[in-house]
Amino acid sequence: MSSLLGIPAQALFGQLLIGLINGSFYALLSLGLAVIFGLLNIINFAHGAQYMMGAFAAYFLLQWAGLGYWWALLVAPVVVGLSGIVIERAMLRWLYKLDHLYGLLLTFGLALIIQGLFRNQYGSSGLPYAIPAQLTGGRDLGFMVLPNYRAWVVVFSLGVCLGTWYVIERTKLGSYLRAATENPALVQAFGINVPRMVTLTYGFGVGLAALAGVLAAPIYQVNPLMGADLIIVVFAVVVIGGMGSIMGSVVTGFALGVIEGLTKVFYPEASNTVIFVIMALVLLWKPAGLFGRTQ
Amino acid sequence: MVKRVLITLLALALPIGVAQAQISDGIIKIGVLNDQSGLYADLAGQGSVVAARMAVEDFNAAAKGLKVEIVFADHQNKTDVGSQIARQWYDAEKVDLILDVPNSGIALAVNQIAREKKKALVISSAASSDLTGKACSPNTVHWTYDTWALANGTGNAVVKTGGDSWFFITADYAFGHALERDVEAVVLRNGGKVLGKVRHPLSTQDFSSFLLQAQASKAKIVGLANAGADVTNSIKQGAEFGIVKGGQNFAGLLVFITDVHALGLEKAQGLIFTETFYWDMNEKTRAFAKRFAERNRGIHPTMIHAGAYAGTLHYLKAVEALKSDDGTRAIAKMKEMPTDDPLFGKGVIRADGRKIHPAYLFEVKKPAESKYPWDYYKVRATIPANEAFRPIDQGDCPLVKK
């Protein structure tokens, strides 16, 4: 069997695939962040907490309403997205004219409060959530067993990412959104309700986070801390990809998932730092990120 | 950012003029230092504070004219934060005893600080057997369990039932390293072999890469030298990747009842591991668990909580007998007096600081076998007290004269 640096090629394929799976979570989450930053100029630090709320929403739907995974995939993003709209209307909209730092502080504070409340109520060990019956089991690919659920995660999140990119970059609605970020006053003058559009955009970004949370619930425990662990990595992904760049965040998300996966083979101890090393290098070389435009 | 929560409870405030010349500032102050917010918050966390308070109540300190106060803080699993709190408590806030201290890295640091400042430290959560080995201290008692006991209990049982080739998934810090080392020694001594190991950062979400490596190793046993949410995530994702279906088995080397509760019996059934306490052992432990759960969001006590209770109780007995809360003398008195409490029964504390009691090999019940809430374990074997822990002459503890 051929091998690379002592690792059998077959094992390497498996690790690449796993990197892609984790990358799809990074991509989905950083996509939401990029949309929110690109259109609202808000650095949404509550994104991790909203991801966690998505997973909890799936759990509650099952426990209280008997609605399974497929319903959760639909309902949880809407519910959490609505909570995002409330936050935008009540708090964020006062901050648009201020420095980024204020939005960051507000959302960071919100994240801590939300996580604290959930932890107080549900503890830190997490709650169980089963993989939907249709997607249990796995396929033997020869070089690894690919769990069906993970395959579904990759396909689904790729679809969502491409769909979002298409809507924002290729449709009329998307062009309104982009125009509103460039010059809100002018767009308003054309008779478009810019504040409402901004509110809905935030709700959509938050909904994407919740969607990632529902996807994650069957893999990880539904845990109040699940977002806190992930959000820092996702921010690094957004920074590497270029703040506000939608394609950048998606491509970088998948790529960094793969790099992290490979690190887990060659030097696992560094697997939680490798992304930050890359971030530092990219920032030295291209301060606006790989896909970002310098303003 | 410092998000340190510090709430003070005056457990007893009887202003009677009992002569307390020997108790520093008239109050015995106990500081519970643990993870209040991270992955170990359920297995230790507020539960340890509740347990310590219950010990103070059951000791009936008020009637004995002793004032006991309990404070707690979150060390966030960061050694620098934990050390800083410990120093501040001992130096400025007149804390006489620090209790619990999960995370062996932090426990080893606080162990050193307690020794420097001649204060008392009773450890329930931290696992590293080095605490009574080369790092042993005249100021520390290690109550509940340690990595040697886990290795001895689970490692022996697994190897003897045919699990003779191992792959370790290890948390990359002092605890994981100590546990892996102690289990590896048991495996090799019993003629087994270790086919590989991988070390992951503390509090990892995704274990699939490590599980794949474990699968590729073809080892019969995947040994999990980690704890808390890291264990539950490993096992849950292991099921997804078909570890057990593929003929391999997990050995959870440190599993708490809160982990089993979080996993659910469907996923956890059949797991075998070693603990020194289970709430459903006898009338006394059941009575304790009932009172405890009422005060701890329904969470039943882990062995950590039991150790925090029993350790506090024995410390208070020693201080009462000594009529002083001087750290070094109180620990010496604790070692001198035999222990007796409702949760661990009668026992002793050795010169190296190791508390001695029996350990149990538990198996997680099948869902059908569980009759009532938190009915999770059955006892596979009892390891008698004199075999449960490392013999005193094998730990390289400088306090022990050879």
Image (tube, rainbow, N blue to C red):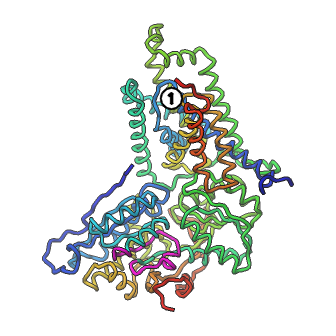
Quickly name the residue at label 1.
Answer: A36
| Residue pictured at 28% horizontal, 85% vertical | B322
| Residue pictured at 39% horizontal, 25% vertical | A93
Tell me residue B88's x, y (percent): 32, 63
Q: Residue furthest front?
A: A285
Q: Residue furthest top?
A: A190
| Residue pictured at 56% horizontal, 37% vertical | A283
Q: Quadrant of residue B182?
A: bottom right
Q: From the viewer's perspective, is A207 left or right of B306? A: right
Q: From the viewer's perspective, is A160 left or right of B107? A: right
State the residue in front, B97 or B231.
Answer: B97
Q: Residues within 10 Å of mark 1 (few under 14, many from 20)?
A: many
Tell me residue A12's x, y (percent): 76, 50
Please say whether residue A62 is one of the residues in the magenta stretch: no
| Residue pictured at 30% horizontal, 66% vertical | B70
Q: Which residues are magenta?
A: B115-139
Tell me residue B343's x, y (percent): 43, 77
Question: Is B249 placed above or below B321 here?
Answer: above
Tell me residue B349's x, y (percent): 43, 84
Subunit ID for the residue under disc 1: A
Question: Is A165 placed above or below B287 here?
Answer: above
State the residue in front, A126 or B284.
Answer: A126
Which amino acid type corresponds to the residue marked 1 in the rendered image?
A: Ile
Q: Quadrant of residue B113?
A: bottom left
